[in-house]
Image (spheres, grey):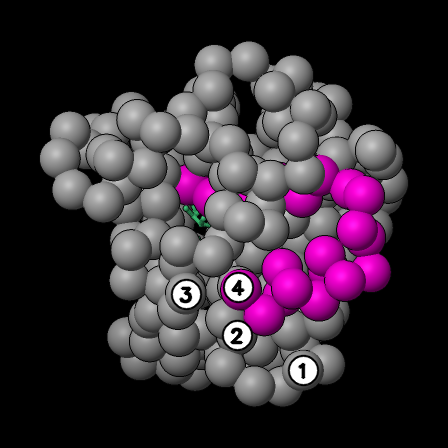
Amino acid sequence: MNQAIGIFGGTFDPIHFGHLRTALEIRQAVELAEVRLIPCYQPVHRQLPLASAPDRLAMVRAAVADEPTLTVDDCEMIRGTPSYTIDTLETLRATRPNTPLCLIMGIDALLGLPGWHRWQDILKLAHLIVAHRPQYQVPRTGHVATLLKARLQTSPLALHENLAGNILLHPVTQLEISATYLRRQIAAGGNPRYLLPDAVCDYIHQHGVYSFTQL
Ligand code: ATP
């Protein structure tokens, strides 16, 4: 079996230090070969992004240009259809039959998992690594609670023993940065510096991303 890899999908509108620190800490703690950041083309569980798909992809690329363990996968952009995670996992699994795939998400995303397209198939293709955020409670009843009861592992090592099917809750440094807040600040003329990488800040400035939008 190959070394496990992480997959971290998101709208990344824009990518910020909350996303990046989560990806880096989980890669280290779980000893993943890499974490692939996969910006979605068109999200299906939320409103459409404000920045264009090429701008969001360029910002993710700029954010990790000097960090070799965080890579960018543009497969959802190339597909150019509504971005279902299950489709991305099926494509990755076809090219990597012997690699444990670890889908990384915040606990807020886990709570919405039962609304995802073919959500029960996701754990047939990947493990879940859930970045624990203290303001969210782990549910005690419902689909997610049942899933956790059956699949929860306490050791990262378990994710290296199987290709898919386990869930790990992992605490990460809490950076309560929100992309929604950033978009609003920038649209109102605020400076987003120190909440996201300088390279992303420069891109936003140079390309006028978010500048003229009303939220
Ligand atoms: P928005 O405010 O536009 O909804 P978001 O950052 O919450 O933005 P995404 O870019 O789609 O939305 O998030 C991608 C993933 O990053 C999700 O799994 C989400 O749980 C996680 N995430 C978002 N913000 C943080 C943060 N500050 N710390 C850790 N994880 C985060």
Q: Which residue carries the number 2 mark?
A: 83
The alpha-carbon separation of the residues under discs 3 and 2 comes to 13 Å
Q: Which residue carries the number 1 mark?
A: 79
Q: Nearer the viewer, mark 3 or mark 1?
A: 3
Graded by Cα atoms within 10 Å as few (under 14), some (14 to 19) or many (20 or more), the crowding at tag 1 reads: few
Region of the chain picked out in magenta, as a range: 86-106
Name the secondary structure under disc 4: helix
Whether residue 170 can be seen here: yes
Reply above or below: 66 against 120: above
Q: Position of residue 163 (x, y in %)?
A: 67, 38
What amino acid type should be assigned to the residue bearing mark 3?
Arg
* x 16%, y 42%: residue: 142
Q: Earlier in the sequence, mark 4 or mark 1?
A: 1
Name the secondary structure under disc 2: loop
Q: Nearer the viewer, mark 3 or mark 4?
A: 3
Between residues 41 and 188, which one lies in front from this camera angle? 41
Name the secondary structure under disc 3: loop
